[in-house]
Amino acid sequence: MAELSYFTGPMDSGKSTLALQLAYNQSTAGRRGRLFSSHDRAGESTISSRLGLVRPAIEVRKEFDLWNYVVAQLTSGQRIDYLVCDETQFYSAEQIDQLARIVDELQIDVFAVGLLTDFQTRLFAGSQRLVELCDSIEILQGRALCWCGERATHNARTVNGEMVLVGDQVLIGDTISVPDAEHGNATQQVAYEVLCRRHHRRRLTRAVARASFSEPLPLGNVGVIDDDPK
């Protein structure tokens, strides 16, 4: 029996890497499939991992009908055994319904990968529908870490290093420069950071903690490995 499987975790937990690994495992087993994505950080029609892995994918725009696409492929003689769908938080609830229908009526496995909640800790519409419909949910074990060293569970949006809770739900990119309406030609640096629940609730980002010295920064040298045995 085909299944609708949902893999989720916060930013930096390896979701897109997993999506590409799933596609690789399926294809090496002789199965044929399609890759889908939406609003990938590297641009349209792409699945990209922060590890540098990149694969072309079909862009799921607002008007895209996944059911009609798959049926058209099958009736034209194409073979489809599975779908890998990345960035599913940006899919509409209707598109998630289409994925469930593809599983149930066409017996095609669907692997859905994406964030569960936004920077306001609210469920994305696509993620909510996946929770309601999927056959299984797996929390990714690639443990993203908050700056304090605890497991990161929440996605935070920052403006010039300070956490914000207002703004559009969808804002693509790791770091974005946007005009500062209050200061003429100045720009604001909009970015994302993963935090543990405690520091997300306190709006305490790495930059704020460093500036205020309110808490130690055990991960202040992230990415630096000391190979000196002394």
Image (cartoon, helix red, strand yellow):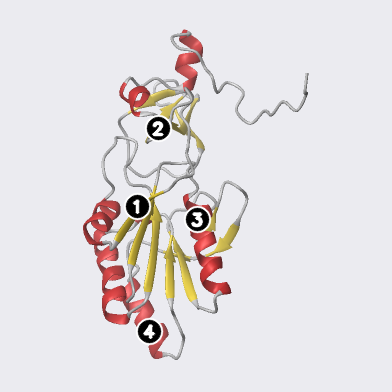
Residue 230 spot, x, y in % from top left: 78, 18
Would you name the residue on which mark 4 appears?
72
| Residue depicted at 28% across the width and 48% down the height | 124
Pick whichever of labels 2 and 3 is earlier in the sequence: 3
Disc 2 crowd rating (10 Å Cα; few below 14, some 14-19, many 20+) is: many
Cα distance, mark 1 to mark 2? Answer: 16 Å
Please state which amino acid type lies under the numbered disc 3.
Leu
Verify CB contact (< 8 Å) between mark 4 and mark 2.
Answer: no
Please state which amino acid type lies under the numbered disc 4.
Ala
As displayed, is residue 19 above or below residue 191? below
Please state which amino acid type lies under the numbered disc 2.
Arg
Cα distance, mark 4 to mark 1? Answer: 25 Å
Verify CB contact (< 8 Å) between mark 1 and mark 2.
Answer: no
Q: Residue furthest front?
A: 229
Q: Which of the numbered marks, if any, corresponds to residue 89? A: 1
Secondary structure under tag 3 reads helix
Secondary structure under tag 1 reads helix
| Residue depicted at 26% across the width and 73% down the height | 101
Cα distance, mark 2 to mark 3? Answer: 24 Å
Q: Which of the numbered marks, if any, corresponds to residue 157? A: 2
Please state which amino acid type lies under the numbered disc 1.
Gln
Residue 13 spot, x, y in % from top left: 47, 43
Would you name the residue on which mark 3 appears?
18
Residue 206 spot, x, y in % from top left: 48, 21
**Tag in front: 4 or 1:** 1
Pick whichever of labels 4 and 1 is earlier in the sequence: 4
Disc 3 crowd rating (10 Å Cα; few below 14, some 14-19, many 20+) is: some
| Residue depicted at 60% across the width and 28% down the height | 222
Residue 128 spot, x, y in % from top left: 24, 52
As displayed, is residue 29 above or below residue 43? below
